Image (cartoon, rainbow, N blue to C red):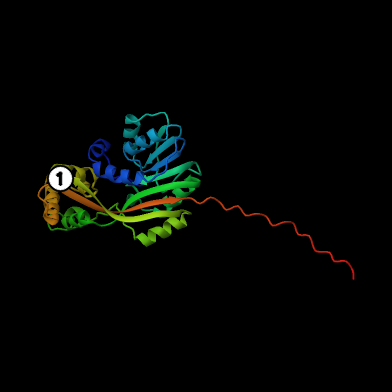
Amino acid sequence: MPTHIYKNPQKYSQNNALQYNFARKVLNKVSFMPKSRVLDVGCGDGLITNEISTIVEDGCVFGTDISQEMIGYAVDHYSRQNLRFICMDASKNIFREQFDVVVSLNCLHWVSKQQDALDGIGIALVPGGQVAILLSHKKSEYHIVLDNLCTSDKWKAYFANFESPRYFFDPDNYKEMLLRAGLHIVEFIEEEMVYTFQTTRQLREFFSASGAQIKQIPEEKKEEFLNDFVAEYLKQIKCTETIPVSFWCLQIICNKPKPVLVKEPPPYHPQLFARL
């Protein structure tokens, strides 16, 4: 089973304002009904999942994540009657036509078997159901600064055998994957989404909680690596006060078409002609 990069859900939950801000923008486009049955693929610490459960008070919400630590944190912190959390690999979806809405926010760019994940989402939906997806699909200044840092003479030894768990996608190819999953694309927006940190400390804590690269660095050198990243990032964006961090994202709304009912042709009765 693939591993999860977030090993400290407490730290993640304290430093996920960027992810929450981005997710809310997409979530506002979803048509929830009071009795909607909702699946959250890649629910993380359960914050957004819990908020959805307050909207669908007469429905139900299942939050899934590959991380046992994240699911444990969510179970411990959110316990509404219509809310459940289970550990599940996004590319091995266990549900079959059970949900009116499926959301996946800030998750799928960590999934290698992307088509399997999208196929699973399509199969989990009832016909007529709605999908909302948010993923970061291509590199921004944040990623470029990080790549340069990790390949610098000072730090490259720690990344000799490093394979990033992060995946990037061409928008046209991604549209094709959605269609192969049996989904109809309603909205497909490519946007450079921006969140502004107020202090360098907030940026450091965000990167420390959410970045995969920091886990390659020995404990005694983590502080220095974080300082180098922040210094280089600030130099590149040329900001001295608040700190904007942008990610190129795909914001996607789809639905699962209802089957088309074909009327049966009327029974065939051969025309009988009277003899002349």
Relative to the observer, which residue lies in front, 191 or 166?
A: 191
Mark count: 1
Say above or below: 56 vs 121: above
Query: Callout 1: few (<14), some (14-19), or many (20+) C-alpha neighbours within 10 Å?
Result: some
Most distant residue in the bottom direction: 276
Where is residue 139 drawn, in percent x and y? Answer: 25, 57
From the viewer's side, name the closer residue of 30 and 43.
Answer: 30
| Most distant residue in the right direction | 276
Determine whether the residue tagged by mark 1 lies in a helix, strand or loop.
helix
Residue in front for this viewpoint, 75 or 238: 238
Residue 51 is situated, as x and y percent measured from the top left of the image, at 35, 35
Residue 235 picture quarter: bottom left
On screen, residue 46 versus residue 240, left or right, reads right
Between 159 and 90, the one nearer to me in the picture? 90
Q: Is residue 226 left or right of residue 117?
A: left
Give the percent coordinates (x, y) of residue 153. Answer: 12, 58
Residue, disc 1: 222
Which quadrant of the figure contains the C terminus? bottom right
Residue at 74% from the left image edge and 56% from the top image edge: 267
Q: Residue furthest left?
A: 240
Q: Looking at the picture, how far across and down is residue 102, in whole percent? A: 42, 44
The residue positioned 15% from the left and 48% from the top of the image is 243
Residue most toward the front? 276
Residue at 31% in and 43% down? 24
The image quarter in which residue 162 lies: bottom left
Residue type, numbered disc 1: Lys
What residue do we see at 84% from left, 64% from top? 272
**In the rendered view, would you say 74 is above or below 107?**
above
